[in-house]
Amino acid sequence: MAQHLMLYTDGGARGNPGPSGVGAVLCGEDGKTIDCFKEFIGTATNNEAEYKALIAGLKLAQKHKPSRVTAFLDSLLICNQMLGLYRVKHEGLKPLHREAAALAIALKHVAFVHIPREENTSADKLVNEAIDEGLGKKLSPPKHVMPGQIDLF
């Protein structure tokens, strides 16, 4: 049976433009994570990264053949552009908006909801991991200290 999926997306750049990443988290109606995606996308602006995250998230949702998708974004600009409340003026964003809109139409029932950044921490975490990995920073596992061992570092 097709389901209603919750999609959380985020894109970010360190600098504007700068090294950028995207993250998407797909959850079921029960709030449990079904799938996720992260990717380093090279140099981009914050808004380009936000659109690329939405595109990646909508493609991820398509794989699960949902009956409905609610997309949660912390970018008010992108959310309002997808809702048709704001025009897309920047030439570099127009093709990204068209691609996101086409994916939303293909999914048939997609709602866009703006949320505060604090409610989008799972997608934001994926963005930062993608950027760190793209910049060659090794993400080390947590250091474990054995009982009785002194950790000097």
Image: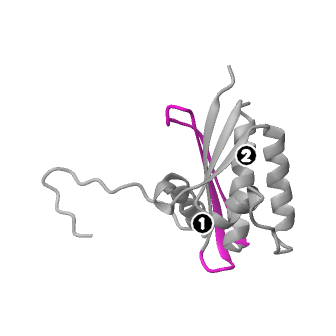
Q: CA distance from mark 2 to mark 1?
A: 21 Å
Mark 2 element type: helix
Q: Secondary structure at mark 1?
A: helix
Q: Position of residue 76 (x, y in %)?
A: 63, 64
Mark 1 residue type: Ile
Q: Is residue 42 left or right of residue 75?
A: right
- Of all residues, the one furthest to the top in this rendering is 1
Residue to which mark 1 is pinned: 131
Based on the displayed image, in which of its 4 quarters is residue 2 positioned? Answer: top right
Q: Position of residue 74 (x, y in %)?
A: 58, 60
Quarter holding the N terminus?
top right
Magenta stretch: helix, strand or loop mostly: strand
Residue 58 is marked as: 2
What residue type is disc 2 on?
Answer: Leu
Residue at point 60%, 60% (across, down): 130
Looking at the rendering, the stretch of residues picked out in magenta corresponds to: 14-43
